[in-house]
Image: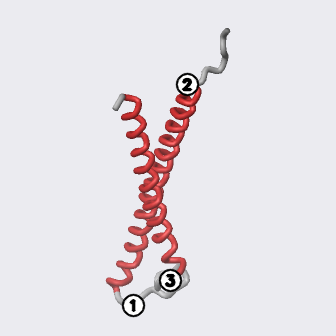
Amino acid sequence: MDARELVHRRRRRYQRFFRRAFMVGAGLALVLFGVPLLYPGPYAPYAPVPSNATTARLIPELVDSQVLLVSILLAFVLWSLAGWITATVLLWLESFRDSHSARPRFHTR
């Protein structure tokens, strides 16, 4: 294998990795964002405060940790999307360059 083929294979692996990371991160972010919308819990701004003191402290902490987790996942999704786009553009440029290097644009007689 020559160096160009190794670079091409490595870029394909990067593209595959970033695509999978994007799909998993986006799926988890959608699940974490969608579950409270589908199944609203007892904690809401208009809901009465629970009588139990530990439950009253626990529910806002769970909501805060869920918001933090969704924020981290969205940053991960944006990072993997940027990597996926970069790897795809590099592969496209490489294939474009290889297709034109075998066939010169101007022929001399």
Going by the numbered disc 2, the residue's amino acid type is Ala
Picture coordinates of residue 71, whole percent (x, y):
45, 59
Q: Mark 1 points at which residue?
A: 51
Q: Nearer the viewer, residue 45 or 79?
A: 79
Instruction: Give the residue drawn at x 48%, y 47%.
Output: 84
Instruction: Give the residue drawn at x 66%, y 10%.
Output: 108
Q: Nearer the viewer, residue 43 or 72?
A: 72
Q: Is 66 situated above or below 80?
A: below
Precedes in sequence: disc 3 or disc 2 = 3
Q: Mark 3 points at which residue?
A: 39
Picture coordinates of residue 42, whole percent (x, y):
46, 85
Specify few, some or many for label 1: CA neighbours under 10 Å numbering under 14, 14-19, or 20 or more. Answer: few
Question: Is label 3 in contact with label 2 (beta carbons under 8 Å)?
Answer: no
Specify few, some or many for label 2: CA neighbours under 10 Å numbering under 14, 14-19, or 20 or more. Answer: few
Instruction: Give the residue drawn at x 53%, y 34%.
Output: 95
Q: Is 25 situated above or below 87?
A: below
Question: Is label 1 in contact with label 2 (beta carbons under 8 Å)?
Answer: no
Number of disc labels: 3
Q: Is 41 situated above or below 101?
A: below
Which quadrant holds residue 50? bottom left
- What is the CA distance from the residue labelled 1 to the residue labelled 3? 22 Å
Q: Mark 2 points at which residue?
A: 102
Going by the numbered disc 3, the residue's amino acid type is Tyr
